[in-house]
Image (cartoon, coloured by chain):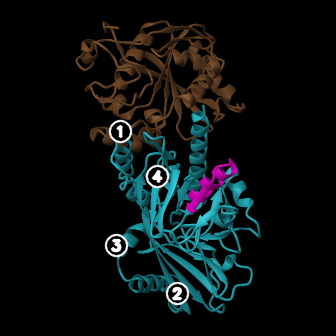
Amino acid sequence: MSTLDARLNALVERDRDHVCQGYGPDQVCVRIVAVANLPSRFGDFRIVAFWNNRDQKDHIAIVHGDVVGAADVPARMHSECLTGDVIGSLRCDCRDQLEAALVKIGQQDRGVVLYLRQEGRGIGLANKIRAYALQDRGLDTVEANLALGFRDDERDYAVAAHMLASLSIASVQLMTNNPDKVKQLEQYGIQVSRRLPHLLPPNVHNRFYLETKSRRSGHYIDFTGTPHLQEQSDPVIVEGMPD
Amino acid sequence: MPQDTIVVGAGIAGLRCAGALQLAGRPVRVLERARTLGGRCATRRFEGQPVDFGPVFLQGLPGEFLAALHQVPGPQTLWPLRVDGAGPPCQPGALDAGTIRLAFPAGLRAFPDHLAQGLDIRLETRVTALRLGASGFQVETADGVEECRDLVLALALEQSRRLLATLPSSAEVDGIHALLGMFASEPCLALIAGYPLEVPAPAWDLLLPENAPALQLVAHDSGKRAAPRFRTLVVQAQPRWSRRRLEAEPGLWAAELLAELGTLLGPWARQPLWTHPHRWRYARVDAANTLTRPIQITFPGGQRLGLAGDAFAPEGGAQAAWWSGFRLAERLLDAGTQKEP
C-alpha cells in the first residue's frame, strides 16, 4: 500500500465514530467510509465514499495525487446530473463541466472533484424531467422550478465544506466561474487561496457560446440555445468566448 | 375594504396557514365547502362513537409536527401498536422505527378542530370561480362574492388546479397550471362497518394485507375508543381498484369490499349491523407526486395567490399538508413585510 493509500485509509479509520454538530442549516455531517483506486480515462484517481446523516445519497470525492493535509488543492464541486453526466444530454453542460474538471485535475500534481449526489441541484430526477417537460412546452417559470425542488446551493456548500475538512485539505484553489461559491465555502471555514476560472474547451456542442455576442445576465442557455434553469450554478465559459 | 386573506379549504394545510397568518395579525377567513372542517382528516360519529375514515392515525418523527399533535387537548394513544400483514402503509415512512404513531379517542378530527380554534371559518361555502380584480381577488361562492387581497387555495391539487383555471391566462398561471397537471392524487374507496361487540376481536390494530385484490388496509377503529358500543372496522381500498369503481354505485363496491373482508377475517365480517361508504376522490399523493414547497403567484396588481396542501411538501400526508400551510404563511408574511415602504 502506498503512503497515499495509507493516509486515505487512515481517514476511514478516523471517521468510524466521527460525530460533529454538522455543517449548515441542515447540520449535515459526513464520514469517509471507503477508499479505492479509480483509474479513469481522465487520469489516475482515487474514489472516496462519504456517508452522511441526512439522506441515503452517498457523496463521493474523486481525488488525484496526495491531497491529505495539502494546501492550494485544485477543487471542483459538481452536482450530480444523470442526464448530462451519463447520457451526454445537450440540455445542460454538466458532462462538459465534469470532464473538463477531471482532465485538468488529472494533469496536475493533485486535485479533487466533489461529486455531490444532488440530482439537478436537489430537484430529484423525476421532478427534473418534469421541469424539462415544462420547458419543452415553453411553460417553465421560476416559481414552478422552485416548487419542483430547484433550489439555491446552500446545502451543497455545507456538505462540500465538510467533505474538504474530512479530507484534511488545508486550502483549495476553487475551480469555478461563480465568485459567490468562494464566499459560500469560506463561510463554512474552508480556506480558498484562489479562484480558478473553469474554462470549457470548445467543441461541436458549445460552439454556440462562441457565436453569442451578448449573454443575458443571470440566464442560463443550454447547448440547444434554450434558456432554462442552470444545473451546475456555474456560468459556462468556453475558451475563446467573447466577454 | 376587502378581507386581507381568504383561505379556501379547511383541511390541515388551510387551517395551519390561516392560523399562522392570524397569529401574525392578518385578518383571515376560511371558506369550506363541507359541513365539517378537517378535510380528509375526517371523523364521523355513529350513535356517538367516533370513527376515523380518512387517515387512520397521524404520525411523525420527533419534531415540530409531532409537537403540534401533542398539543391537541384530550387523551391521546399510541396507535397502532399491533400491525399485521406485509402490505405497504399509505405513507412510506409511517411504520418506520422512531416514528411516533398517534390516535385520539375522540377521533383524529380533534387535530384540525384544534388548529381551527379562534379562526373565522365559513362552512358549507363552496367556491366556484375566482376573478382577478384591480387590487385583489373576487371569490365566487354559491352565496355571493367575497373579496380579498391575498388568496390561498389549500385543496387537493386537482381541485386547486380547477380553480386556477378560472383566472385569466398569464405566464405564471399557465405555467403553474401545467405543472400541477403533471401530478395526480390517488383515490380511495373507504367503507366503515359496524358490528356487535360480540364478534371476534381482531389480533391486530391495523391490517395491511399483502396480496389482497382490493384491500389496502383494515383498521380496527373501535380499538381506539374508550367505551365503544360497536366493534368498528374501517376498510380502505387500493388506489387502482378504487379508480376503476370511482363512478360506480357505492352499494356495489361496498359489497365487494365486505366479501373480501369476510374471506380475510371470517364469515362474520360479511354481516355488519350497518355500513357507511365514503368515496375519497383525491385521497392522497404518493411520494413520486409531491412538490417540495408551496407555490405563490404574484399578479401585476400585487395580488398574491398561494397554493398549499399535501402535495406541496415532500412525501405527502397530513404532515406535508401541515408544513406546506405553515411555509406558505411564512412566504406571504415575509413578502408582505418586505413590501412595506
State the residue at coordinates (52%, 45%).
B293
Disc 4 residue crowd, few under 14, some 14–19, many 20+, Cα 10 Å: many
Nearer mark to the viewer, of 2 and 1: 1
Q: Are marks 4 and 2 in contact (CB under 8 Å)?
A: no
Q: Chain drawn cyan, letter?
A: B
Residue B42 quadrant: bottom right
Q: Which residue is mark 1?
A: A140
Instruction: Compare marks 3 and 4 and give the one earlier in the sequence.
Output: 4
Q: Which residue is mark 2?
A: B275
Labelled disc at residue B137: 4
**Callouts 1 and 3 in the same chain:** no
Q: Position of residue B69 (x, y in %)?
A: 70, 60
Please tell me whether residue B19 is drawn above or below residue A39 in the rendered image.
below
Q: Distance of mark 1 from mark 4, alpha carbons?
A: 24 Å
Q: What is the distance, in whole Å, between disc 1 and disc 3 at their CAs?
A: 33 Å
Give residue A2's quadrant in the image: top right
